Image (tube, rainbow, N blue to C red):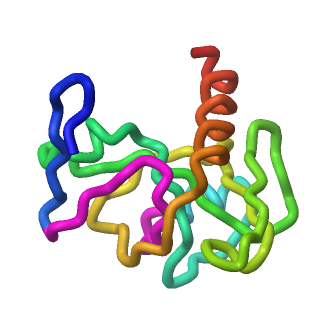
Amino acid sequence: MTSAAGFEPKAWHDGRGFVQGQVYLADDRHVSEALKSAFGMEVKKSRPIVILQNDRLNSVPQVPVILVAPLTSQARVMENDYVLRADGKLLEKDSVVQLSLLQPIPKRALTKFIGKVSGDDLRAIKELLRRKFAL
């Protein structure tokens, strides 16, 4: 797969290629600091995240971190967070992409691929990010 800019994504060290909009389970040691400080949430073994970093940066092995947002089924929605509706495939429950807790984590913390958000949801998330950061 080659983009219009002529860049060809490369897989990360274990053969996975990370793509914006993918949902993974991540080792919670790397995700929970922001959640603990914001909500007093406990560290779990793993936590679902959505990859928000662009595909060009995702493919660079020299960049060991990836920008993600935690995904939660908790009903609390903060300003600029995005609600994903349960579809029975990717999500069993309505969930919230916590854009207010956007953070970089090590790529090696991503442990299990779950799926990918729909194109419509990804576009809406990116629009919220544009407004959040006034881009």
Q: Is residue 27 magenta?
A: yes
Residue that appears at 63% across and 15% down: 134
Q: From this viewpoint, is residue 28 visible?
A: no
Q: From the viewer's perspective, is 1 left or right of 110?
A: left
Q: Quadrant of the N terminus?
A: top left
Magenta-highlighted residues: 14-31
Give the answer, above or below, for where 102 lies relative to 42.
above
Q: Nearer the viewer, residue 90 or 42?
A: 90
Q: From the viewer's perspective, is 19 left or right of 132?
A: left
Give the answer, above or below, for where 108 lies relative to 58.
below
Q: Position of residue 19 (x, y in %)?
A: 37, 51
Q: Nearer the viewer, residue 12 or 69?
A: 12
Q: Quadrant of the C terminus?
A: top right
Q: From the viewer's perspective, is 58 left or right of 86?
A: left
In the image, farthest residue toward the bottom = 45
Q: Position of residue 110 (x, y in %)?
A: 36, 68
Q: Which image quarter: residue 62?
A: top left
Q: Main secondary structure of the magenta part?
A: loop
Residue that appears at 67% across and 54% down: 97
Residue that appears at 20% across and 38% down: 2
Q: Position of residue 9 (x, y in %)?
A: 19, 45
Q: From this viewpoint, is residue 60 visible?
A: yes
